Image: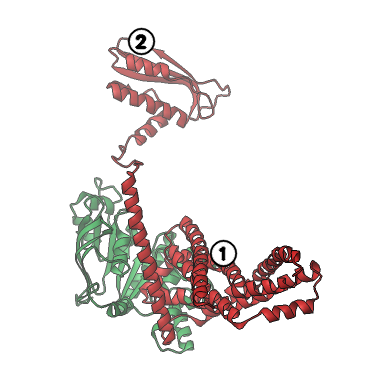
Amino acid sequence: MARAEVSVAESQLSLTRPENGALVIRLSGDWRIGHDLPNADGVAKEIESGSGLRTVSFDTSEITGWDSNLLTFMLKVTQWCAEKKIECRNEGLPEGARRLLKLASAVPERQGAKKESRREPFLARVGSGAMQFVASTGEIFAFLGGASLAFGKLLVGRASFRRSDLVLFLQQSGAQAVGIVSLISLLVGLILAFIGAIQLQAFGAQIYVADLVGIAMVRVMGAIMTGIIMAGRTGASYAAQLGTMQVNEEVDALQTLGISPMEFLVLPRMLALILMMPLLCVYADVMGILGGLIVGVTMLDLNPIVYLSQTKASFTLTNLWIGLLYSAVFGVIIALSGCLRGMQCGRSASAVGEATTTAVVTGIITIIVATAVITVVFSVIGV
Amino acid sequence: MSVVEPHIVVKGLDMGYGSFILMKNLNFTVNRGDVFIIMGGSGCGKSTLLKLLVGLKEPSRGQVLYNGVSFWDTDPDERDRMMRRFGILYQSGALWSSMTLAENVALPLEQYTDLSRTQIRDMASLKLALVGLAGFEDFYPSEISGGMRKRAGLARAMAMDPDILFFDEPSAGLDPVSARLLDDLILELRESLGTTFVVVTHELASIFAIGNNSVYLDVETRSMTASGDPKKLLAESTDPNVRNFLTRGEAGSQAESPVE
């Protein structure tokens, strides 16, 4: 490889048959990556058809440079020769190339090492899908059971977690979420007021915008909006935190110490969300009503005092309790789905990403389903 | 160690994942005060065996006895108590990243002892000093080097003065000098505390320097093909795979003398 010739000749290939049964392949020029290689079909044809051909040898005295380009060509020729049981003499090759070739063929290809992509029949896929579903449902229930046990231990005061962790999670899921909750719920209040205003103006009943926004926010919208925000914000971060701890064997380290990850990791996170969600929800209600007020005053020319007293008239404690119940349930759902996906996380970086995604998806879907269920229940019992 | 007394006994152990069997019929005994090496090529199940010994994974078949008590047949509370007598150093250190080094070492003490805060703090400082990390109490795991993280992991593993210390690849990712220091530390601890060590490794220098008992897991036959003092195995074993492993694949040539 050390030949330093200035002229860069094109790589060339010529075949000669000096005597019967022998083929000499003469290589010349530059055989490095970046140079077009001569067509090897001629060699292949010669070897394939070579009647009475017994040996193939090489002459590389005029080669000016080589690298893996030459080696791949050589491997091809060696393979053709092996197929036809022709002796392939590589004495004529540069020393380094000979050694590399030897290295490449030192370990034979492992049988069955290449992965086959086999497509399973339809029924088998349905079956394994169903079995996976059963298994994952089992996992979810086991997790729920573990979480309930940890909660029970908390009630009797025997749960082991660090109080400082709880305070930190309270801050993360409470105080630090205020900004985004303000923005979103203010906007939701605005949107509700706008939609209501267009319809109600037609009847000259603009003032009922206050009722609409007030009741909708307090009874359900405040809770749903905070739920969705927190699922994206805190649920995802729980899944990522626990997932990373799985990857780093930190969860194993807890377990082998006899410390239950359920109590130590999941419980304080769950507790923080259950405590903070209702507070955030009340705050979101207030911001939503404020959004409605802005629309009422600027677009419908309502007096702010009149708007607020109308809101007050429509406000009932029952609605507030219902809203708080929703938000507490959402808190449990978000914490559980975040922690569940985090604890199920595999041992790779992409698994953490997956855990985060599924945590948010599971969280939001469950929130919507739970809303539907609770709403139906309340309408049946007539609250 | 004058009195030889079995500490860990493994009987007819099969391990695997689902229906896939990784290793069949493992039988060995670790005596109190041994430095027991689990060795074998990559992917042969060394780390899985370790997981199984520390109770993170259930065996497919067979038993593990600690001081004569079967780990998997006993009730969960007793199992928890047994696990508390283990100290484990994970491959990556596995320090809890949201806590300082002192808090990491202190957590097991907080959980299982009635010591006062200052006592726990002193104890954590002592353990960190033992592994050469005095003064690093308030550092977070992400602020120190890989070698230091390993040593901090060791300090945490020793927090409860365990009976058995398990090491998963202690010298992986360490420079030769740090690896040697860790080996010296292991020997020192064994001499002074009489702790039993179970070490998963494929560092030959470490194996000969610290091990006085071992088991070799063979990938091809999926079973243990040799056990005993690694130095003796090097001198006497006739199994070509074991010889290959212990001589870095130079089994045919003259065997080097072990590192003393």
The chain drawn in green is B
Where is residue A223, by image quadrant? Answer: bottom right
In the image, farthest residue toward the top: A19
What residue is shown with label 2?
Answer: A18
Location of residue A257 in the rendering, given as x and y in whole percent from the top left corner: 37, 75
Q: Chain A is drawn in which colour?
A: red
**Camera-side residue: A244 or B100?**
A244
> Which subunit holds the residue at mark 2?
A
Is residue A249 among what the camera can see?
Answer: yes
Tell me whether marks 1 and 2 sit on the same chain.
yes
**Camera-side residue: A383 or A223?**
A383
Which SS class for mark 2? loop
Where is residue A55, by image quadrant? Answer: top left
What residue is shown with label 1?
Answer: A232
Real-space Cα separation, disc 1 to disc 2, in angstroms: 77 Å
> Which subunit holds the residue at mark 1?
A
Q: Which residue is located at x 36 percent, y 73 percent?
A: A256
Location of residue A119 in the rendering, given as x and y in whole percent from the top left corner: 35, 42
**Camera-side residue: B183 or A101?**
A101
Label number found at residue A3 = none
Q: In this view, does A367 lie to the left or right of B110?
A: right
Which SS class for mark 1? helix
Q: Which amino acid does label 1 sit on?
A: Gly
Q: What residue type is labelled 2?
A: Pro
Location of residue A53 in the rendering, given as x and y in whole percent from the top left corner: 30, 14
In the image, farthest residue toward the front: A203
Q: Which residue is located at x 34 percent, y 19 percent?
A: A56
Q: Which residue is located at x 38 percent, y 26 percent?
A: A76
**Camera-side residue: A215 or A84?**
A215
